[in-house]
Image (spheres, rainbow, N blue to C red):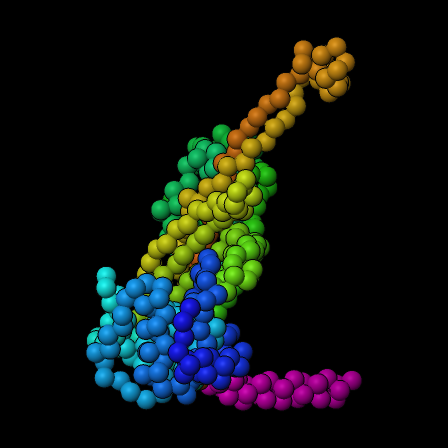
């Protein structure tokens, strides 16, 4: 690679650029030629940097760089060691410039106004965002319940017909599932055909060993912010970064729930608009790579404070192998005259487990409302203490 004397001096001068800046977002490449790496100081002149980029571009891509932006001055951003084209995009983006690739040349021009608006919107939103005593919070109670799909089908549970925390169940099917007590419990809970309380249904299924509650977390989320619940584990994969170094990247698996609630109003009545993403994933090592088995559901719901909604249909198949046959003889070793094959066999059973996620949302009083409640309760507390003291004095006098 041929570099001018000026560029060699610049490279020696800026090779000690701050390592801390390398913690910023860096492009990840499978492999980068060490000869295509650059390091730039934020005080470097834009024209000099563009000249350096053009030398790399001509040598490695055969394209020249045409600058139509008219921009001049310092590049204004520290560039840690990275590929020259990534560095070009980093410098251009910081100065609201667009990089356009063509077959024979690379063009630099001013970023369109709408694109600048899109890029600057997150920062403007952060600046304009205010949190005060009237900021609302939403309390979200989530219940992760894993149940045998066959039991749900036998009961005739209709998850699409959930109202006020109750779900419709086929009571005749409930009486036929083998445990009369369960049928009585479910049927007795349905008063007037309004459905069965979801908690009662879960308790009944747990008592039958047909399901279990995995977890029941509760979180509070400010309106417009995201909340996340994970029941599972993270695993890591080793990859090469842009400089050829081996880095570990972590991925989340298990049961994951992400929500973004917003509070809207209709004629003064608040209601909740919430985007929900539910994921169920497991990791299985493969011959050449790691396989992630994933079931995912995304939805948007409208709810009043105190209402309940259900996300169902996330399935996982379990395979159980059981040895059956004549006791003792079925468990003999295979070399013992082959008797284990005459008196026993392997029974394979596939069980489909369904994950049901129950969400209950409620609006939390603002800090101002809670503070007013504290002040209002203080006089009542003093009055109660005074009454208790007077009653205590009367009891002493009576003695």
Q: Residue at x 62, y 22 (%)?
A: 346
> In this rendering, does residue 257 appear at all?
no
Q: Is 281 drawn above or below residue 216 in the view shown?
A: above
Question: Which image quarter: residue 234?
Answer: bottom right
Q: Is 84 drawn above or below residue 380 in the view shown?
A: above
222 part of magenta stretch: no
- Where in the figure is residue 144, as x and y percent of width and height? 51, 52
Q: Residue at x 23, y 80 (%)?
A: 69
- Where in the figure is residue 399, as x and y percent of width and height? 78, 84
Residues 114 and 183: in front is 114
- Where in the figure is residue 153, as x and y percent of width and height? 44, 35
> In this rendering, does residue 299 appear at all?
yes
Q: Residue at x 53, y 51 (%)?
A: 254
386 part of magenta stretch: yes
> The N terminus lies in which quarter of the figure?
bottom left
Q: Is 369 drawn above or below residue 137 in the view shown?
A: below
Which is the main secondary structure of the residues drawn in magenta? Answer: helix
Q: In this view, does 116 lie to the left or right of 36?
A: left
Question: Which image quarter: residue 210?
Answer: top right
Residues 21 and 252: in front is 21
Residues 284 and 45: in front is 45
Residues 289 and 375: in front is 289
Q: Which residue is drawn at 48% across and 34% down?
A: 150
Q: In this view, does 252 lie to the left or right of 48?
A: right
| Residue interval drawn in magenta | 370-399
């Amino acid at each position: 690679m041929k570099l001018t004397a000026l560029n060699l001096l610049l490279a020696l001068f800026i090779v000690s650029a701050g390592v801390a800046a390398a913690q910023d977002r860096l492009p990840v490449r499978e492999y980068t030629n060490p000869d295509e790496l650059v390091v730039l100081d934020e005080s470097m002149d834009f024209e000099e940097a563009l000249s350096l980029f053009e030398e790399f571009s001509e040598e490695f891509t055969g394209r020249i760089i045409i600058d139509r932006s008219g921009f001049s001055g310092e590049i204004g951003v520290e560039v840690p060691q990275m590929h020259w084209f990534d560095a070009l995009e980093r410098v251009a983006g910081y100065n609201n410039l667009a990089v356009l690739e063509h077959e024979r040349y690379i063009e630099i021009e001013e970023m369109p106004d709408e694109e600048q608006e899109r890029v600057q919107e997150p920062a403007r939103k952060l600046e304009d965002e205010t949190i005060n005593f009237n900021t609302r919070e939403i309390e979200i109670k989530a219940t992760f319940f894993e149940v045998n799909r066959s039991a749900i089908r036998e009961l005739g549970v209709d998850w699409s017909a959930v109202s006020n925390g109750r779900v419709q169940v086929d009571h005749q099917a409930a009486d036929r599932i083998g445990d009369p007590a369960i049928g009585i419990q479910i049927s007795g809970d349905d008063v007037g055909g309004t459905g069965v309380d979801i908690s009662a249904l879960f308790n009944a299924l747990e008592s039958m060993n047909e399901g279990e509650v995995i977890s029941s977390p509760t979180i509070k989320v400010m309106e417009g912010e995201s909340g996340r619940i994970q029941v599972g584990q993270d695993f890591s994969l080793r990859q090469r970064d842009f400089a050829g170094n081996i880095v570990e990247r972590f991925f989340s698996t298990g049961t994951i729930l992400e929500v973004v609630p917003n509070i809207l109003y209709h004629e003064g009545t608040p209601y909740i608009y919430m985007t929900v993403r539910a994921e169920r994933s497991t990791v299985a090592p493969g011959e050449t790579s790691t396989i992630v088995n994933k079931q995912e559901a995304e939805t948007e719901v409208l709810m009043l404070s105190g209402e309940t909604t259900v996300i169902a249909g996330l399935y996982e198949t379990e395979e159980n192998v059981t040895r059956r046959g004549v006791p003792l003889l079925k468990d003999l070793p295979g070399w013992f005259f082959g008797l284990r094959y005459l008196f026993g066999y392997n029974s394979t059973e596939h069980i489909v487990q369904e994950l049901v996620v129950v969400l209950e949302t409620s609006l939390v009083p603002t800090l101002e409302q809670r503070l007013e409640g504290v002040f209002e309760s203080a006089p009542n507390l003093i009055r109660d203490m005074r009454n208790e003291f007077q009653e205590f004095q009367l009891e002493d006098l009576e003695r």
